[in-house]
Image (cartoon, grey):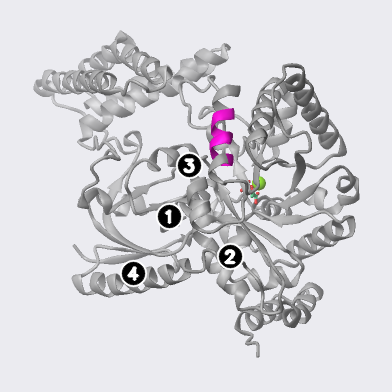
Amino acid sequence: MASFTLQGIPVSRGITIGRAHLLRPAAMDVKHYLVAQEQVEAEVVRLQKAIAQVQLELQTIWSDLPTDAPTELGAFLDVHALILSDPMVSEAPLDIIRSRHYNAEWALVTQIDALSAQFDEIEDEYLRERKADIQQVAERVLKVLTGTAHQLPRATGVDERNANMIVVAKDISPADMMQFRDVAFTGFVTDEGGPNSHTAIVSRSLGIPAVVGLGNASHLIVQDDWLIIDSDAGVVIVAPSPLVIAQYRDRQAALLKARKKLHKLKKTPAISLDGIEVTLLANIELPEDAHAAMDAGASGVGLFRSEFLFMGRTSVETQLPDEEEQFIAYKQAVQTMKGKPVTIRTLDVGADKPLDHNEHNILNPALGLRAIRFCLKEPQIFLTQLRAILRASAFGSVHILIPMIAHAFEIDQSLAMIQQAKDGLRAEGIAFDDGILVGAMIEIPAAALSLPMFVKKLDFLSIGTNDLIQYTLAIDRADHEVAHLYNDTHPAILQLLDITVSAAIKANIPVAICGGMAGDVKLTRLLIAMGFRELSMPAALLPEIKQEILNSNIAALEPSAKKMLRTFDPRIAQELLYGMQQQQFV
Ligand code: PEP
Ligand code: MG
């Protein structure tokens, strides 16, 4: 097969070489053709056999469930088995083959589409949501029919083949990304997605190379194709020649060596050449990520995206983690960090992190009921989380971070809820840190432009540049079609960052950046010269950022940063930024 190269959007660092593992939704690819009269019964049997095979698969998964598996998992499998044995799914498509002579895949999809349309009409939300289950069951059958029924390899007993697996998909939801955490794979490429979609964020936190926004890679790449991901360049080489593979293996080895060298800085504080210390923190999605944070030498967790504990509970989505489950998760992170601060952000669901896969009907999810808006509308969910966070605060240093703040009342109500949670715990005699610090994410331009409204009530600020850019420049951060407009040094963004850091310094409260800009080494000098002293990023990026700080003289960089803030000419701004990156200090 001839080699070819695809260009996409780089989302993480490094090079990986491996074989493609396609996660193409089978339903998208069904062939449509009519079968001859004499073939009809054979086609019926083909579908029956596929259905029987899936029944067997479900039973096997059921009996292989570990004894400590969540009970919902078993229930979820039961529901799928039940759906599959329902005549509307297992028999109606056979009638379609017989009456209309459709091929098996087409007949199945026709019936599932008809059923799905009926489900859309149902008023009861729970029942309506079962549509997704029906579609997942159909997907399984289609995969058997089309011979694409690949299971993800299991985490245990990783062999060479699995260790070199690169996932290729149209898109991967953040929730689906979570399942890959337990599976050995060395990279992923997707047709869709922007540089700061949550899927990209998870890949960065796993520290694995990835390229997104590749257009139709999942159609051009074939299962088991050799692939090279050069994620710094945003390039995927399909079916490379042995010579190209050898060249990339050399580059990969050099990068690994450089990374190992950087790891030696683990215990070195991030102090600039002119003696200014910058606190480097890690972003985590799940409590176990705290180990990577410690290993990278982070001074704490600057952002624990707690919503990842809530996501990906498809079919049992109604079962949110209860107080105890959350408490255990938060405590685990806090204890792993051994007294270093852990900033737990309260539930930031919505937009590209739906609690429920079926939230398709929201008009404009990024502008909808996200984050604190959702929490204040669902006070019981919020209170449960606040109690769990407070309980974890008895085991170390915990800060609470409220996302998506734009209005004064959102802070007031959040603080009132925190007080309510404290009062409840106190009445029950449960320990917590009464002096727990509470901060807010600055990620809506309105918040940055009205900081005096908040700062007096808050202990710290943390800037979410991913959303700040999305909302300031009006570009969906997950949409690759507008990814070229995602410009973190747009003058409007720099002004908002400057306003925020100045307001925090004036109010004498700490301000961090926890969005993607904090982990972009090309911006480190600019940010520290603008006055930022706390940066929180995926642990894998921390050593490189530290090295940049160690090699920087902040005072000497300040004049260029000031000029950058004054210019509205993109060319001059780029020259200044480049000049800062290249600046040598004597
Ligand atoms: C951000 O918006 O920059 C941020 C850190 O939060 P998230 O990426 O989870 O929205
Ligand atoms: Mg955000």
Q: Give whichever of discs 1 and 2 has the lower sequence position.
A: 1
| Residue under pointer 4 | 252
Q: Amino acid at mark 1?
A: Gly
Disc 1 and disc 2: Cα gap in Å? 25 Å
Q: Give whichever of discs 3 and 1 has the lower sequence position.
A: 1
Asked if one can make out residue 321 in the rendered structure from this viewpoint, the answer is: no
Image depth: mark 1 or mark 4 in front: 4
| Residue under pointer 3 | 288
Image depth: mark 3 or mark 4 in front: 3
Q: Position of residue 306 (x, y in %)?
A: 59, 37
* Residue sitting nearer the eye, 377 or 553: 553
* Residue sitting nearer the eye, 535 or 376: 535
Residue for point 21% across, 30% down: 145
Q: Give whichever of discs 1 and 4 has the lower sequence position.
A: 1
Stretch in magenta: 327-334
Residue furthest left as drawn = 38
| Residue under pointer 2 | 520
Disc number at residue 105? none
* Residue sitting nearer the eye, 236 or 393: 393
